[in-house]
Amino acid sequence: MKKLLHFISKIYRISLHHKKQESLVWKDLKQTHHKSEWKSGVYEKERYIETVFTISEEKAASFYYFIHEGSLHCRVKVLENFSPEITTDIFVLASHFNNLLVNGIVKVDAVNQYVEYDQKLDLLVLLLYRGEIKRLISTHYFTAKDVSAAFDRLITEQEAPAIIIADLLKKKESKNQDNPE
């Protein structure tokens, strides 16, 4: 009986008008932040949530979560400012990431000189599986940490983008061999 009610609940959620679907996912997003006890700012009028997470030992970043065009978006600036002299390397590193990432995209704003990592997930998935919000936030966070570390390495160590990506892939492969799932 419990499975039947759960199934009917899913059917009901996906059969609603898209504005009502957005409202349900917005409510689920707020509940996820509240239950996780993250320090978040919820902006009801603008319908976004801002949460500050630490992405390295010496760096914190503001993560933004909002619903737009039928998807839940996660956005964070992984690099606040860069010198115009390294713009080409910034674009090359971002391109390497975009070729490797299954979900999300690394965007470079050359005019305002910042880099951000965005990820989104269709509302339909979130309506069917409520736990996906927390998984999306987690995936976005850990990927943002890797992207941020790579750009920090480019800036501080002036390492070539290809070497940074190769080292990151080697690290991920080693981690996967240590923890096969």
Image (cartoon, rainbow, N blue to C red):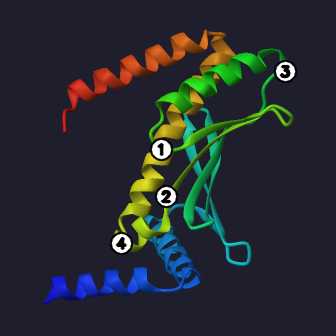
Is residue 57 in view from this perspective?
A: no
Q: Which numbered dot is residue 103? A: 1
| Residues at circles 4 and 3 in contact by the CB criterion of under 8 Å | no
Crowd class of label 3 (few under 14; some 14 to 19; many from 20; radius 10 Å):
few
Cα gap from disc 1 to disc 3, whole angstroms: 28 Å
* Amino acid, disc 4: Leu
| Residues at circles 2 and 1 in contact by the CB criterion of under 8 Å | yes
Crowd class of label 4 (few under 14; some 14 to 19; many from 20; radius 10 Å):
some
Q: Which residue is mark 3?
A: 84
Q: Position of residue 58 (x, y in %)?
A: 61, 32
Q: Residue at x 47, y 74 (%)?
A: 28
- For mark 3, give the secondary structure: helix
> Does label 4 or label 3 sit earlier along the sequence?
3
4 or 3: mark nearer the eye? 4
Q: Residue at x 48, y 65 (%)?
A: 37
Cα gap from disc 4 to disc 2, whole angstroms: 12 Å
| Residues at circles 1 and 4 in contact by the CB criterion of under 8 Å | no
> Does label 3 or label 2 sit earlier along the sequence?
3
- For mark 1, give the secondary structure: loop
- For mark 2, give the secondary structure: strand
Q: Position of residue 180 (x, y in %)?
A: 19, 33
Q: Is residue 29 left or right of residue 174?
A: right
Q: Which residue is mark 2?
A: 121
Q: Position of residue 48 (x, y in %)?
A: 65, 67
